[in-house]
Image (cartoon, rainbow, N blue to C red):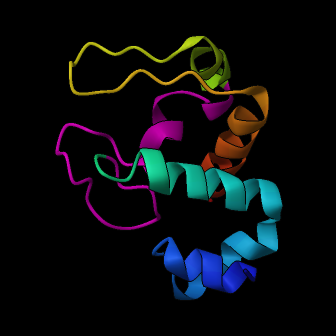
Amino acid sequence: MKMPIVLAALGVSGLTATAVMAQGPSVSRGQAFAQANCASCHAIDRTGESPLRQAPPFRTLHHRYPVEDIAESLAEGIVTAHPGMPQFQLEMGEIGDLIAYLKTLEK
């Protein structure tokens, strides 16, 4: 399956798909992870509201702290104060991919 088809299947369109493809495979994998595991609660793109009001949009995370700082939490398993957040424990490659994608949202 070619990358534009994969990105279209993930709900990524237009300029966003082009920008992600230009960033490389790590960013594309990070966005795919976010789409599959996070988008039901968080806004994962440059625009739009989070489906779950309490869930911060990913594009604002860097205003709270450097996104690189979440690497350890992702490796150990993110646990939050609200019960609806699933616990995630990512592999090192997945962490790098997700952070690479989050960094693209800072611009």
Residue 82 lies, with reference to residue 40, above or below; the image says: above
**Residue in view at x 41 percent, y 45 percent:** 38
Question: Residue furthest toward the bottom?
Answer: 14
**Residue in view at x 35 percent, y 26 percent:** 86
The x and y percentages for residue 94 are 70, 37
Residue 103 lies, with reference to residue 61, above or below; the image says: below
Residue 12 lies, with reference to residue 82, above or below; the image says: below
- Count of numbered circles in the view: 0
Residue 85 lies, with reference to residue 73, above or below; the image says: below
Which quadrant holds residue 85?
top left
Q: Is residue 54 visible?
A: yes
Q: Is residue 16 visible?
A: no
The x and y percentages for residue 105 are 57, 56
**Residue in view at x 66 percent, y 57 percent:** 104
Span of residues in magenta? 42-68
Which quadrant holds residue 73?
top right
The x and y percentages for residue 12 are 51, 76
The quarter of the picture where the N terminus appears is bottom right
Q: Is residue 13 left or right of residue 39?
A: right
Task: Check residue 50 for magenta coloring.
Answer: yes
Which quadrant holds residue 47?
bottom left
Q: 82 or 3, which is in the foreground?
A: 3
The x and y percentages for residue 42 are 34, 48
